[in-house]
Amino acid sequence: MSLLCEEPSVTPLPVTEAVVGIDVGLDHLLVLSSGEKIGSPRHERHDRTALAKAQRVLCRKQKGSNKRAKARVKVARVPDRRTDHLHKITTRLVRENQTLVIEDLAVSNMVRNHRLARAINDAGWRQFRQQREYKASWYGRDVIVVDRWFPSSKLCSTCGALAAAMPLHVRTWTCGCGTTHDRDVNAARNILAAGLAVTVCGAGVGPQRKPPGGQSATKQKPLRREL
């Protein structure tokens, strides 16, 4: 017997002129081109001990018992806090902005760095991008993906000068034009400018890439509509 369910209809949001560039990080989950910084709750770090304890309790419960079912629910609730936090942020950004410009990060490659893997997974970068893209599709918004090799951190958003180097420990820097930049805010503004250039010129800011296996993944392509 097959079951049929009707998907709830989603009404596109009214068109707005608001646009935003988004830079993700570890110190802050997000930095917006407006200068706003959204902190990372780091649920995984806070809940690591609680999760381990809940899993030990689950292992001691008899299989098939009601107590084991309740213990399983407690284990499942720990990672749901991060998902709920991401949903709130993505829903807000999609509602407030017509165009969202993000950077195409190779998360699968970045988590190979064992020093950063736990923090990156805790931040939920991959899940965050997925939520933004399908919600933008639902509500008639645009997501523009800037090439990962675009030098957003080293480029002065005021005069366009390119710094020779920008080590990760440098959080603020002063350009030759006299402008002092917050590294992350400057990167978000450059990401926004590059994304708006895409809508004007009708071309990407970098070469199109395919994921491993040669398949052209929809998630790697920007969602564009006529502005």
Image (tube, rainbow, N blue to C red):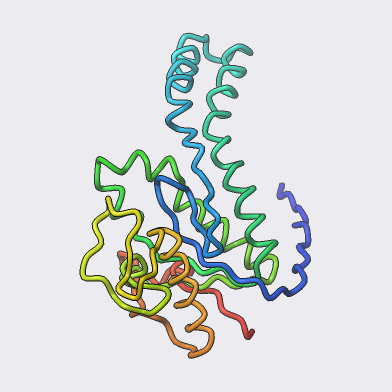
From the top left corner, tell me how far across and down residue 198 is, in percent. Answer: 48, 83
Horizontally, residue 173 falls left or right of residue 87, namely left
Relative vertical location of residue 192 with respect to residue 116 in this rendering, above or below: below
Relative vertical location of residue 139 with respect to residue 66 in this rendering, above or below: below
Task: Name the quadrant containing residue 135.
Answer: bottom right
From the top left corner, tell me how far across and down residue 183 is, in percent. Answer: 38, 59
- Image quarter of the C terminus: bottom right
Residue 168 visible from this viewpoint: yes
Picture residue at 58% right of the left edge, 29% below the top: 77
Looking at the picture, tell me which residue is in the foreground, 77 or 165: 165
From the top left corner, tell me how far across and down residue 216 is, in percent. Answer: 40, 72
Horizontally, residue 118 falls left or right of residue 1, namely left
Looking at the picture, tell me which residue is in the foreground, 121 or 191: 191
Q: Which residue sits furthest front?
A: 178
Picture residue at 66% right of the left edge, 55% below the top: 92
Horizontally, residue 165 falls left or right of residue 220, namely left
From the top left corner, tell me how far across and down residue 190 is, in percent. Answer: 43, 72
Picture residue at 21% right of the left edge, 70% below the top: 164
Relative vertical location of residue 156 with respect to residue 183 in this rendering, above or below: below
